[in-house]
Image (spheres, rainbow, N blue to C red):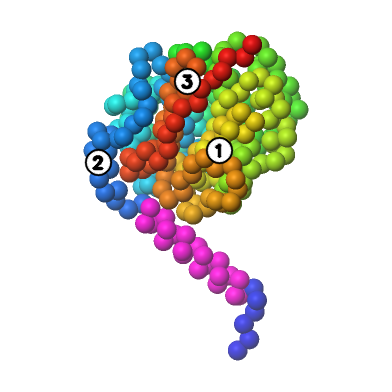
Amino acid sequence: MRISRHWLTGLLLVALGLACAGGAARLDGPVPGAQNAADTLALTLPTREGSLKFAVLGDFGNGTRAQTQLARMMARLRTRFPFELVLTVGDNLYGTDNERNIRARFEVPYKALLDGGVKFYASLGNHDTPEFQRHYELFNMGGDLYYTFKAPKQDVRFFALQSEYMTIEQIGWLERELTNAGEAWKIPYFHHPLYSSGDRHGSNLPLRRILEPVFLKHGVKAVFAGHDHVYERTTPQQGIVHFVVGSGGQLRRGNIDEGSGITARAFDTDLAFLAVEIDGDELFFDAISRTGAVVDSGVITRTPRP
């Protein structure tokens, strides 16, 4: 019997799909010991009065049980670390962008946070539909593809960028907004990472050539991105620490390229989000997994520019 090359290719794809589905099923299983994890979290965050407390989450809206489990961990964390807002670094909703989907894959999993007054400030990824999500009230985008806002506490301003379509107009807007921003901390966040050790995508070099000179010019010290479905913190690249937080719902196990030479800490065996606290010239962070493990922590100190 003659077997065509196309038939073999199809069979291989099916096998790979089944393998991935099996991994997803294991990830969606019970999380041993997670029920009271918020009470035993080995947090390094100082949780100071008057500090700015927020979370970073990316690549999350797939509606799986694992996503819901991570969302519950975020809610449990908030009983000890009362963060006020969440920055999303894109791919906020997988599948069709409509009211039914966004309710099932966003409003229901994060209901405890939304009911507690936590505000989500979204940036858009390549799986997001701009015309739907930028007008979605709970993403607080105000109808804009990119926008900036001042944090409710501390001397911090955030810049949500649209990295899927980095237009000349957006670069001009960013340059003007950074120039006019008087805040000590200027923090951009967006989907495609300038630096990443993820094997699937990795560093976006064209975007780096455009954005990095602007960030350096204006004293940016920390950048948040997603796209690669892992957690990673880079060593400082020209003085800037880059975080990849693409493990909020999707996960690519074993996807970190350990030979990239830019990784300070990486985690690609479970879902994770990032908890951040800014107080004065210090930015503290804890990366927290679905089981409540603190998989990375540290502090970035901002040296005031002359």
- Say which quadrant the C terminus sits in: top right
> Dots 1 and 2: beta carbons under 8 Å?
no
Q: Is residue 26 visible?
A: yes
Q: Amino acid at mark 1?
A: Thr
Q: Residue 155: which numbered mark, if any?
A: none
Where does label 1 land, which residue?
234
For the image shown, how many numbered marks are present on the structure?
3
Residue count near mark 3 (Cα–Cα under 10 Å), binned few <14, some 14–19, many ≥20 = some
| Place of residue 281 in the rendered image (x, y in percent of width and height, measured from the top left) | 50, 17
| Place of residue 147 in the rendered image (x, y in percent of width and height, measured from the top left) | 60, 22
- Foreground of the two, 240 or 160: 240
Residue 18 included in the magenta stretch of the image: yes
Q: Could you tell whether 83 is left or right of 305 in the image? A: left
Q: Is residue 91 visible?
A: no
> Dots 2 and 3: beta carbons under 8 Å?
no
Where does label 3 land, which residue?
282
- Foreground of the two, 144 or 183: 183
Mark 3: secondary structure = strand
Residue count near mark 1 (Cα–Cα under 10 Å), binned few <14, some 14–19, many ≥20 = some
Mark 1: secondary structure = strand
Q: Residue 35: which numbered mark, if any?
A: 2
Q: Amino acid at mark 3?
A: Glu
Q: Could you tell whether 10 is left or right of 204 in the image? A: left
Tell me the residue at 49%/54% (across/down).
Answer: 254
Mark 2: secondary structure = loop
Q: Could you tell whether 68 is left or right of 169 in the image? A: left
Say which of marks 1 and 2 sits in front. 1
Stretch in magenta: 7-27
The secondary structure that dominates the magenta segment is helix
